[in-house]
Amino acid sequence: MTDIAERHAAITTTAPNARWHGAAFEARLRRRYAAERRFRLAGLAAVALAALVLVLLLGSIAGKGWTAFQQTQILLEIDFDAAEIDPQGTRDPAVLAKANTMKLIRDTLAAQFPEATTRAERRQLSDLLSSGAPFELNRMLVADPSLVGSKQAVWLTASANVDQFIKGHIPRDVPAAERKVNDLQIRAIDALTAKGALTKAFNTTLFTAGDSRYPEQAGIGGAIVGSLLTLVVCLGLSVPIGVAAAVYLEEFAPKNRWTDVIEVNINNLAAVPSIIFGLLGLAVFLNVFGMPRSAPLVGGFVLALMTLPVIIIASRVAMKAVPPSIREAALGIGASRLQVVLHHVLPLAMPGILTGIIIGTARALGETAPLLMIGMIAFIVDIPQGFTDSATVLPVQIFMWADSPERAFVERTSAAILVLLGFLILMNGLAVFLRKKFERRW
Amino acid sequence: MRVQTETRSAPAAPAPNAKMVARGVKVFYGAKQALKGIDLDIMANEVLALIGPSGCGKSTFLRCLNRMNDTIDNARIEGTITLEGEDIYGRHVDPVQLRARVGMVFQKPNPFPKSIYDNIAYGPRIHGLAAGRDEMDAIVETSLQRAGLWNEVKDRLREPGTGLSGGQQQRLCIARAIAVSPEVILMDEPCSALDPIATAHIEELIDELRGAYTIVIVTHNMQQAARVSQRTAFFHLGEMVECDDTEEIFTNPRDERTQGYITGRYG
């Protein structure tokens, strides 16, 4: 008898009580429990590590970005001098819109801070305010011409440097040459703060404005609209085409060499670097078809090409997961193949298809590289009004702001990232909600 | 696809009251031949049991009767099968219509993940059998009654069919097949996933349905074949070894392979 056979014989001839009790048995049991504990701990550690990294990442972005949601404002007692802004007394909106409100601000500041005597010093004082502040006054005048001739206390947007100083991003105790805010300006800020004429308020500009070279006037409104327009085009193309392609390939296409080739190529497309799609868009949509540059229409086309394989693959997987017994049941009572698909397979696969669509959309929403190639990286101040207007999208806006040297753009970059993450969370939440809802119905 | 083969040497004349007649039915899955020329008559209003060891082709034959094999890509069928004298593989026959005339009940209960009502109503709805809501309600009620399920589910027609027990689900599937008023009902091992009590229920049901429908049942359970069927066909390795009255098959088989199978020597 071989060694192993002898051992086996020895084991099987031992009395059951001896086999399932005793020191050797208990040691074995302990080892088994220990192994399981180790495995569970390793899993827990992995989850904890991932959570920690996520918290660090989100924490750092939120820590840098949350201050951008507030903007410093300065209260000025503006004298809307009729002789200055509307000498003819016509109250014509065109005149009011062009009125020299900068002078009103300068006069107010000069009256408030008589110690600024030189032209340079007065200029430094007016730099406390955003270069957009005069336009705010013009807009007020156009909206309400009766202001002319009156004296009003008006909250005006402070300049980015003042804003950063107030938020502590520009330190007070470094030599004046290394500060973006000089001593005169600091004295003025302190005086205004003491009067309660300088405060931080919610930064609506960040959400309503387009891009700007001046951080305090820059916003992601244009980028959000651009992203939405692009996604509408992208989904409008990729969802019907993707689902139809998936239905055909999964339910109707014969399984032969051609469908294999198509399948391999779809999987390949899903793995193609996104910049390639951008180059394709540039070469085909812009150069061959002459479509407008920087337009959400073309961006949507390019992103649709990118999202298609994701939707097709997810939809096919979802349809494959529908049990064949359901198809047979429907065929067995005389449903046509189209009826089987429309009445049974698609509804049952809907949660999976929706998940695929939303994952694809989330990817498209966060995509930057292909859009750079078709010119959506342009500096665009106006909020796009249609699919062919020049536009940019949220991630490209983040990319451009991250490139800007101004301190105030650092926090705006983080704030834009927070908004983008917010959209992504919203979409994924919607995916989970829809999935749950459909699952309950069936 | 199907190729008409040359007329065989001596095609037996079909019995006068045959509902479906199969002659020289061969099925190929790719290069593999699953059926090697089956001749079989299915009489009206009888229960025909198909028995035989696994892989003998009885399910394949059953699926030829309502052209379910059409849905398999590489399946190829030769020979003729007629329903009421009409070739079901004929060019003018629509497989979708055929499946309404020849219903099917599967091995595993497979109700749609919809309400009990919608499970029954689905067939009549796609075939346009009910003119209005009342008529549909009537179809649903009679179908469930015939399947012996009405009393158990009449108060919860809106609940999902998947919430029923296994036996109830299978009766729901039978009711669903009945709802489109088929002439023939094919049953592919309908009790193999059920417990003995549910099985007994289904067997009683099959016996009751015999009056109105022609039933072909594939079973691995020889007692079941003996209990529910009037005639039995024994399949072996893609051939039909013999087909006779059930009593005759079980008491006095002509072929020794049949003898071996029913006495449990192989299978």
Image: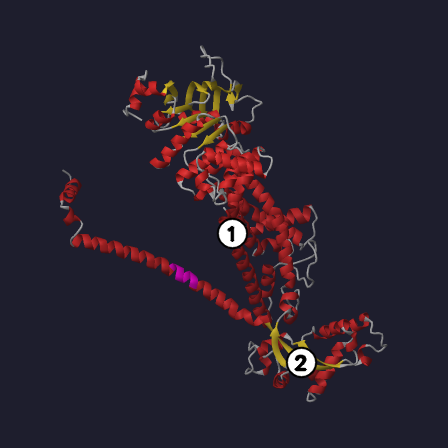
- The amino acid at mark 1 is Lys
Do the numbered discs 2 and 1 sit on residues whose CB atoms are within 8 Å?
no
Residue B195 got which mark? Answer: none
Mark 1 chain:
A
Of the two numbered discs 2 and 1 on the same chain, state the one appearing first in sequence: 2
Q: Say if residue B122 shows up in the picture.
A: no
Marks 2 and 1: same chain?
yes
In x, y percent, where is residue B232?
Answer: 38, 22
Q: Nearer the viewer, residue B50 or B153?
A: B153
Q: Which residues are magenta?
A: A46-51
Q: Which residue is mark 1?
A: A437
Q: How is the image coloured?
A: secondary structure
In the figure, is residue A241 to the left or right of A118?
A: left
In the figure, is residue A78 to the left or right of A92?
A: left
Looking at the rendered image, the quarter that the N terminus of chain A falls into is: top left
Q: Which residue is mark 2?
A: A75
Question: Gap between marks 2 and 1, in whole Å?
Answer: 51 Å
In x, y percent, where is residue A365?
Answer: 58, 56
Which quadrant of the structure image shows residue A38?
A: bottom left
Which quadrant of the structure image shows residue A118?
A: bottom right
Q: Is residue A118 magenta?
A: no
In the figure, is residue A394 to the left or right of A31?
A: right
In x, y percent, where is residue A138?
Answer: 75, 73
- The amino acid at mark 2 is Leu
Q: Say if residue B71 shows up in the picture.
A: yes
Mark 2, Cα crowd under 10 Å, few <14 / some 14-19 / many 20+, is some
- Secondary element under disc 2, as helix, strand or loop, is strand
